[in-house]
Image (cartoon, rainbow, N blue to C red):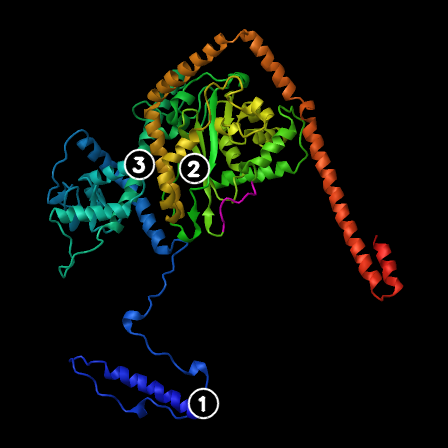
């Protein structure tokens, strides 16, 4: 009881002292209250939980921990749905703005924006804050049934920051400038918002609240929404342009073929609905238009069928990168963008299930180009061949990397999102299979891959890609990684030692990764779908730039590659004392000798000998264990039955 009263007295004393130090609202100190008001003399069992801690001051109370959403909520879903419904209505105003201002200096924004010419319309005026290049201003926007508020803003080169009731708009020219910067750097909304605020402040434009206090971060959220959905508007405009171009292309094909049985419109031309777009379809003579748009030098021809021994028609390279990860804790957002470069997850997973199913079946007979001993060594020495090798912790990351497919001109064609711990071969196989779906039925392909020898044996042993594709497909290792393979493997798969591959090296993926390296850090903390959007849009920018520079690329390779290395090789042949026919004959004899099974017999025998030695070592260890157990039992006073049991175990 004494201890209980002492504790209660100490508790009351602390409360009183704190109350004495607490001033009233008028500034005077409060009088201490009676101690009896805070004391309770009823006898209760003394427990630690009964003693309450001292209350913390308000400025020291820890803020509640913010829980980050891992999935989008209903409010965000509705917001994104409003944006998706709004963007198609802005294509027309954006096209008018672009045609009106193309190659012309920009004029000032009028104080009142209106498009309505009907006096009977019910008009509504809204004040909007507009962010321009050099300042921000406020304008009155008149909307009605003829033109909605976002349509009026876009027609006057302003983009709304909200889909339904915007209060802030951003200049389309400012967004276009940021888009060009975005394509050559990375997503930097925070930097743009801070830089814009600093620029406005230095020019004497300071945004304040109703009390006159300067706002510290007034633009970031609005700019983020405007940048994202302005880019989606650009995608919608590009899609309609591609549709129109494809329609004209199909129209020309119809008239050239003389097939006018298609239903016609009022002007005598086939309707767009009767001419399906072929961006994802192939013809018997040409590839799909999506391939032609990405690299006309590779896919723009109409003659295919070159033998694989002569180099094939098309050279592609594939490789994986495990730096482009995504943290699981960063969560996800609603779907807002349909990627044009990334394969659907369902297609990749279906390839993985199909490959696993075929592996369980007995292997079929095939012609071995390289002894299995050499390929086995390559398979164990490369991490890419080990699908179970964990390159990222799945507890922290839900997406662990990206697989890319590029053409011989280093232009990106397609991507596959890696969501497994290791670099499983299903990603490369899915990319190759998707490519063949878009190629003519007689086109041949040479695929460069770090573990091309392992993948070639896999598709030869098991019916994973189908006979039609395997007959038109040849694998090779990339030039840099080839020298880490067995010599017998290099004789068949090294592009510098095989005929027909020229100066194709398959290392263009490394150049692609270097151009995307600046996205690594920011993508890990972005939402999952925003990460795909960032990669897809940057891939489109890189592809467009490289396609525009295709002539210069070919010119550089011809001057520094074909001419330079070709003259050096001819000089070496001329300096030798042997003819070209003699050198070729000796090279063929060397390949035949070093690719024979007999040449790899020592390695096979060594492997079998190692197995026997391992078994003998295990037997010796077991024998020592039995002998130790026998000695222990023999030295103890045990019954004879124990020794009989031990003899039975032997």
Label 2, on which residue?
342
Residue in view at x 13 percent, y 41 percent = 109
Badge 1: residue crowd in 10 Å (few <14, some 14–19, many ≥20): few
Residue in view at x 31 percent, y 43 percent = 187
Q: Quadrant of the N terminus?
A: bottom left
Residue 280 seen in the current view? no
Label 1, on which residue?
44
Q: Is residue 136 left or right of residue 237?
A: left
Residue 434 tag number: none
Kindly state the secondary structure of the residue where label 3 is placed. helix
Where's residue 575, x and y in %? 49, 8
- Could you give the CA–CA distance between mark 2 and mark 3, rounded to whole angstroms? 18 Å
Q: Say which of 226 and 510 sits in front.
A: 510
Q: In this view, does 485 lie to the left or right of 528?
A: right
Badge 3: residue crowd in 10 Å (few <14, some 14–19, many ≥20): some
Residue extending farthest front: 635
Residue in view at x 48 percent, y 28 percent = 480
Label 3, on which residue?
183
Residue 584 magenta: no
Where's residue 473, x and y in %? 54, 24
- Could you give the CA–CA distance between mark 1 and mark 2, rounded to whole angstroms? 69 Å
The part of the image, by quadrant, that contains residue 98 is top left
Where's residue 563, x and y in %? 40, 14
Which SS type dominates the magenta stretch? loop
The magenta segment: 387-394
Kindly state the secondary structure of the residue where label 2 is placed. loop
């Amino acid at each position: 009881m004494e201890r209980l009263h002492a504790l209660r007295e100490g508790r009351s004393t602390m409360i009183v002292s704190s109350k004495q130090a607490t001033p009233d609202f008028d500034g005077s100190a409060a009088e201490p209250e009676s101690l009896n008001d805070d004391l309770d003399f009823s006898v209760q069992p003394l427990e630690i939980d009964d003693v309450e801690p001292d209350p913390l001051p308000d400025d020291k109370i820890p803020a509640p921990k913010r829980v980050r959403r891992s999935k989008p909520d209903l409010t965000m879903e509705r917001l994104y749905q409003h944006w998706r419904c709004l963007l198609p209505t802005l294509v027309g105003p954006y096209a008018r703005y672009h045609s009106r201002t193309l190659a012309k200096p920009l004029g000032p924004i009028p104080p009142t924006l209106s498009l309505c010419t009907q006096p009977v319309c019910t008009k509504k005026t809204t004040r909007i804050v507009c962010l321009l290049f050099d300042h921000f201003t406020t304008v009155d926007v008149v909307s009605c049934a003829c033109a909605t508020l976002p349509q009026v803003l876009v027609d006057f080169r302003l983009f709304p920051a909200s889909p339904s009731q915007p209060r802030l708009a951003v200049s389309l020219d400012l967004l276009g400038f940021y888009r060009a910067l975005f394509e050559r750097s990375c997503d930097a909304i925070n930097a743009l918002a801070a830089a814009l605020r600093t620029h406005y402040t230095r020019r004497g434009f300071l945004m304040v609240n109703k009390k006159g206090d300067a706002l510290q971060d007034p633009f970031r959220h609005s700019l983020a929404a405007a940048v994202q959905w302005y880019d989606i508007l650009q995608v919608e405009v590009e899609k309609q342009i591609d549709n129109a171009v494809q329609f004209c292309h199909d129209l020309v094909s119809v008239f050239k073929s003389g097939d006018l049985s298609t239903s016609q419109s009022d002007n005598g031309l086939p309707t767009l609905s009767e001419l399906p777009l072929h961006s994802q379809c192939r013809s018997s003579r040409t590839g799909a238009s999506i391939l032609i748009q990405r690299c006309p030098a590779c896919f723009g021809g109409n003659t295919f069928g070159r033998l694989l021994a002569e180099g094939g028609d098309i050279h592609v390279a594939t490789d994986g990168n495990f730096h482009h990860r995504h943290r699981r804790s960063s969560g996800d957002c609603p779907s807002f963008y349909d990627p044009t470069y990334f394969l659907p997850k369902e297609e990749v997973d279906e390839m993985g299930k199909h490959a696993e199913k075929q592996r369980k079946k007995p292997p079929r007979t095939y012609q071995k180009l390289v002894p299995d001993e050499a390929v086995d060594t390559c398979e164990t020495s490369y991490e890419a061949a080990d699908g179970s090798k964990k390159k990222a912790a799945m507890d922290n990351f839900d997406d662990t990397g990206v697989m890319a497919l590029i053409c011989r001109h280093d232009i990106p064609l397609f991507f596959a999102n890696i969501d497994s711990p290791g670099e499983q071969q299903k990603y490369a196989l899915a990319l190759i299979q998707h490519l063949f779906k878009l190629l003519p039925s007689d086109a041949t392909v040479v695929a460069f891959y770090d573990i091309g020898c392992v993948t070639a044996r896999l598709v030869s042993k098991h019916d994973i890609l189908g006979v039609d594709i395997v007959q038109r497909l040849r694998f090779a290792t990339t030039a840099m990684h080839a020298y880490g393979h067995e010599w017998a493997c290099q004789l068949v798969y090294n592009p510098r030692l095989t005929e027909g591959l020229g100066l194709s090296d398959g290392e263009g993926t490394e150049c692609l990764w270097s151009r995307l390296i600046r996205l690594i850090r920011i993508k890990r903390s972005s939402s999952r779908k925003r990460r795909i959007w960032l990669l897809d849009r940057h891939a489109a920018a890189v592809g467009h730039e490289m396609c525009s520079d295709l002539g210069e690329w070919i010119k550089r390779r011809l001057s520094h590659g074909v001419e330079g290395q070709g003259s050096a090789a001819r000089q070496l042949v001329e300096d030798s004392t042997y003819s070209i026919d003699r050198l070729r004959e000796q090279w063929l004899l060397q390949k035949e000798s070093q690719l024979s099974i007999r040449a790899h017999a020592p390695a096979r025998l060594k492997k079998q000998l190692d197995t026997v030695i391992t078994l003998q070592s295990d037997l010796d260890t077991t024998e020592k264990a039995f002998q130790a157990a026998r000695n222990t039992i023999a030295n103890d006073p045990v019954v004879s039955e124990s020794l009989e049991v031990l003899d039975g175990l032997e």
